[in-house]
Amino acid sequence: MTSNRFAEFRSLHHAAEPLLLPNAWDYTSAAALAAAGFAAIGTTSLGVAAVAGKPDGHGATLEETLRLAGSVARLPCPVTVDLEGGFGGGPTDIAVLAERLAGMGVAGINLEDGRPDGSLTDLTAQVEAIGAIKSRVPELFVNARTDAFWLGVADPLNEALSRSSAFAHAGADGVFVPGIATGDDISALIAETPSPVNVLFLPGRHTVADLASLGVRRISLGSLLYRAALHATVATAKAVAEGRPVSADLPGYADVVALIDEPADRS
């Protein structure tokens, strides 16, 4: 991967409109999203784990994550990969993993501070991990995620503000606070955080236009698309079983084959 892919991905966080980042769970879902014109693609750890029949957020899908990263990096748009909490490694281990991904052609990573037991990782350790990554592979876009809202800590906004600021000063290129919902909280986060802010899209709570007006620079869809695909799978099977019409605009066999066979544009 040439350095322009790193620069391209970084620039998407400083454009006139926020980056709407759809999250894929396998090569074909990523290829379909790229073919639909999305500027960049992320991966969803829930989708990757669920496809493998493993738990999400427990560091159990390193092999699957690496395999997916190697395939989606062939796509003609920047790709960022969800590393959960670093798959159990210390700062040096996570930095080595990040460098490996960058070498595959991945433009960015997502690193979270939530742990399987429902706690937040030690802030010093997380800051050290971010610093180690940026020292080893400075061009890689590090999106540092805090689960302060996700895990329902006592004072999620202040915790998120403290951690986001620390992550940004450690070198994080962006900060991600999933679960933050109100305009007031989002505005406070943006005002206090020097790095571009990433928010998880919450259906019924947000619109892209609303988040853009607040100054959000990246809007992630997380596991939404994977969950929607599961819903569509069951709904279609039930429609066939019950004699109801099936959507006429589904991709055909040849359409899927074309996504797989499409030559990668790595210019």
Image (tube, rainbow, N blue to C red):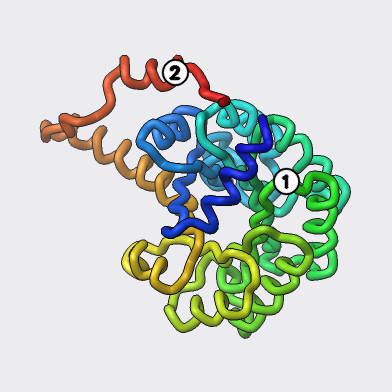
Residue under pointer 2:
262
Q: Which of these two is toward me, 114 or 117?
A: 114
Q: Which of these two is toward me, 12 or 27?
A: 12
Q: Where is residue 95 in the image (x, y as percent from the top left)?
A: 82, 47
> Residue at position x 59%, y 31% from top?
73
User: Which numbered mark, 1 or 2, is in the foreground of this view?
Assistant: 1
Q: How many marks?
A: 2
Residue 139 marker: 1
Screen quadrant of the N terminus: top right
Specify whether 131 is left or right of 199.
Answer: right
Specify few, some or many for label 1: CA neighbours under 10 Å numbering under 14, 14-19, or 20 or more: many
> Residue at position x 52%, y 29% from top?
75
Q: Position of residue 262 (x, y in %)?
A: 44, 18
Q: Which element carries disc 2, helix, strand or loop? A: loop
Q: Quadrant of residue 243?
A: top left
CB-based contact (under 8 Å), mark 1 and mark 2: no
Screen quadrant of the C terminus: top right
Q: Which of these two is toward me, 184 or 3?
A: 3
Specify few, some or many for label 2: CA neighbours under 10 Å numbering under 14, 14-19, or 20 or more: few
